Amino acid sequence: MQQSTVQGHLVMELVASPEASVGVAVELAYEPGDPYAVRFTFHPPGGAPVSWVFARELLVAGLSGPAGEGDVRIRPADGEPGGVRIVLHSPEGRALLRAPAAPLTAFLARTERLVPMGRGLTERQLEALLADLLGGGRDAG
């Protein structure tokens, strides 16, 4: 079976204040080689792209209830049925983003079909990864 990347696109609102927000294009990516992580690449207007990688399980949990204790916190949006709120903390500051849950749910469903939650790396994939890290047991000389 050919492994492939799961990708998605959506527009999230970057909330500057209760009265002001701006749309931000976001690329979503999931790689079977890193089965526990999802990547969000934000393309702010007039700025350089910024990527965040966090646990796929965190995104799943955050769609139905508050999740996360560190730099990434996700939860359903208050007063917005079908919405989700993501808060990102970094040394540069804090960003509050809002998005519709439907495209995130669809993205996660596609990742689940590729690599079911909890399956991660197979024993054979883990052995191959270890062999690569250890030089494959072959002499380079």
Image (spheres, rainbow, N blue to C red):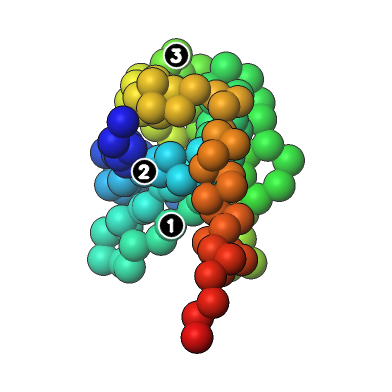
* Whether residue 9 can be seen here: yes
Amino acid type at circle 2 is Ala
- The residue that mark 3 highlights is 81
Amino acid type, callout 1:
Ser
Quadrant in which residue 60 is drawn:
top right
In three-dimensional space, the C-alpha distance between marks 3 and 1, rounded to whole angstroms, equals 27 Å
Decide which of tag 2 and tag 3 comes sooner along the chain: 2
Residue in the image at 46% along x and 45% along y: 33
Q: Which residue is mark 2?
A: 29
Front residue of 99 and 114: 114
Residue 104 drawn above or below residue 29: above
- Spot occupied by residue 130 in the image (x, y as percentages of width and height): 60, 55
Nearer mark to the viewer, of 3 and 1:
1
Q: Amino acid at mark 3?
A: Pro
Residue 14, given in percent of the width and then of the height, sits at 41, 46
The answer to whether one can see residue 13 in this image is no
Residue 102: percent from left, percent from top = 35, 20
